[in-house]
Image: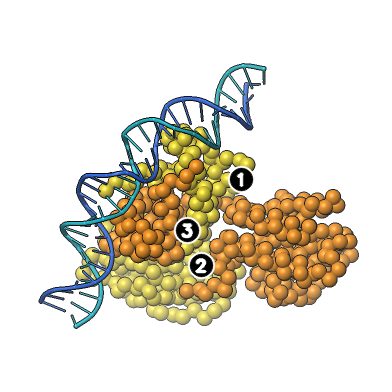
Chain colours: A yellow, B orange, C cyan, D blue
Amino acid sequence: MKVVQSIERAFAILNEISKSPAGISDLSRSTGLPTSTVARLLYSLEKLDVIEREDGKSIYRIGTSIVTMASSVNPTQRLLTAAQPHLRGLVETLGEAAGLAIPAGYDVHYIGEIDSPHPVQIRDWTGTSLPMHIVPSGIMFLAHWPDDAVEAFLKHPLDRFTAQTVISPLAIRQRILEAREKGYVWLFEEFSEGINSIAAPVFNHTGSVLGALHSHGPSYRFPAEGMEDVIAQRVMQTASSISEALGFVPNQISK
Amino acid sequence: MKVVQSIERAFAILNEISKSPAGISDLSRSTGLPTSTVARLLYSLEKLDVIEREDGKSIYRIGTSIVTMASSVNPTQRLLTAAQPHLRGLVETLGEAAGLAIPAGYDVHYIGEIDSPHPVQIRDWTGTSLPMHIVPSGIMFLAHWPDDAVEAFLKHPLDRFTAQTVISPLAIRQRILEAREKGYVWLFEEFSEGINSIAAPVFNHTGSVLGALHSHGPSYRFPAEGMEDVIAQRVMQTASSISEALGFVPNQISK
DNA sequence: CAAACCATCCCATAACGTGGGAAGATCTAT
DNA sequence: ATAGATCTTCCCACGTTATGGGATGGTTTG
């Protein structure tokens, strides 16, 4: 089937406008369309509240209807969709499960995962929640909280899950600093004996932490000897790609 | 000029989808368009990343390109545009200046105003900032902060601007409670001798406070004898209309 | 003050979107 | 399991509808 021409053109124009507001002839040049065509499309879009302009002026910008539509999308849903292909890629290169989590109070909530191809694999945690201090995604979330919020967290009871679970506020603070600096965290058998895992943060377009990407596997094979750093790089890189897919611009200079 | 048919139809479909994701025949029914037409438009929109669907399924929902476009709009800009007609209306009915402000740290930042038609009028504060405790918009912002944030605010030095300025933490706490309950605040000559003002909050689509609407005038005529409540109602009503224009749904039931 | 630029409007032309309908896919009820 | 109901996808002849050249008038620039 063929894409309807006028719609394709309308969205070409919209994309230009969203990059930076512009007038008819600017848009005619940037899209390569005749001015009369651009004028007609702009007229239509304006009538439909898709774009707007200052009363007299003829500089068009994105209008209310776009914002309204966008506000109807569930951020979690969006994270999942945007991340899907990247998750797949990560699972393929690592050979281990990879998934996504979002913060929910003092817990980490698992929202999606792609399982490892290995016959020996970790169960899928999707839909469940775990305390922040026992999983790397949680440490990553804490690392992006203001200090007083972290202190409040450290004051509430911190359960021990395995012999390795770190529950000392001092050690957790240290670990948070390290997470901030490195951009990832490894946790070894702190939630469950025999499971190691790593996580890196995913940012939304405003630069705040929307969720975390993690990968985990049985400790006998994950991470493979001396591969901690290589894996960390891959995970961070994948997390960055997801952030970018969500509109996050790295090294953003706030205006 | 005439609105381009396919574009009009495409956005009719998009609006339906943003209300709730749907398939071809649902949309055909809700828009009154032939299924083949809907199918073609959906195909086009999907190719352009305006809508998306789960791999196999055919339930369409709003896609990345819409969200990306929307994320490019400056919330303050949007507030100003959406509020414009409502501000005008308020100035007309009250006969006094009305404007908008947003929170900025412990200050209130004035972003726009429409002046009173009176020859005797207050200067336009657009672009300037004032401490929260001396203007009603500021009290309104404080009223929507969590208690511990308010306490932190009250601990920092609170300057006196006029003989009437309330700087006692106790009195400000009281005033905040009243603001929460009533949904508006009057302040009488607390920022400057001879100026009275009132403010009400404006919410965004998530229900958080985006800014505040205020109106002010010379104290010798504003508010007119016994009109405090009537004016308050008008201001609150206008603020609500602006909130709704921004996608805020009153009495929202979170799902 | 002229030249360059821009938004808007008009209209003849045919390209393009349209929608009926068929075929295939999927779901539902018994 | 099976038939019917319902849905999505595909095709194609038709003519409605989008198109773009160009003219007009307004605005900015040098």
Q: Which residue is mark 1?
A: A54
Q: Earlier in the sequence, mark 1 or mark 2?
A: 1
Have a look at marks 3 and 2 and say if they share a chain.
yes
Mark 1, other Cα within 10 Å: few <14 / some 14–19 / many ≥20: few
Q: Which residue is mark 3?
A: A70
Is B121 placed above or below A216 here?
A: above
Q: Secondary structure at mark 2?
A: helix
Q: Which residue is rendered at x = 70% and y = 76% of the image?
A: B181
Mark in the foreground, 3 or 2 = 3
Q: CA distance from mark 3 to mark 2?
A: 28 Å
Residue A131 image point, x, y percent:
45, 75
- Circle 1: element type: loop
The amino acid pointed to by label 1 is Glu
Q: Which residue is found at the position 67% from the left and 66% from the top?
A: B237
Question: Mark 1 or mark 3, which is nearer the start of the sequence?
Answer: 1
Question: Which residue: 32% across, 46% down?
Answer: A3
Please state the chain letter of the residue tagged with numbered disc 3 in the rendered image: A
Horizontal relation, residue B131 to residue A223: left or right: right
Rate crowding at label 2 as few (under 14), some (14 to 19) or many (20 or more) other CA atoms within 10 Å: many
Please say if A34 is above or below A20: above
Q: Please name whichever residue, B252 or B161, is drawn nearer the observer in this view of the structure.
A: B252
Residue A246 appears anywhere in the view: no
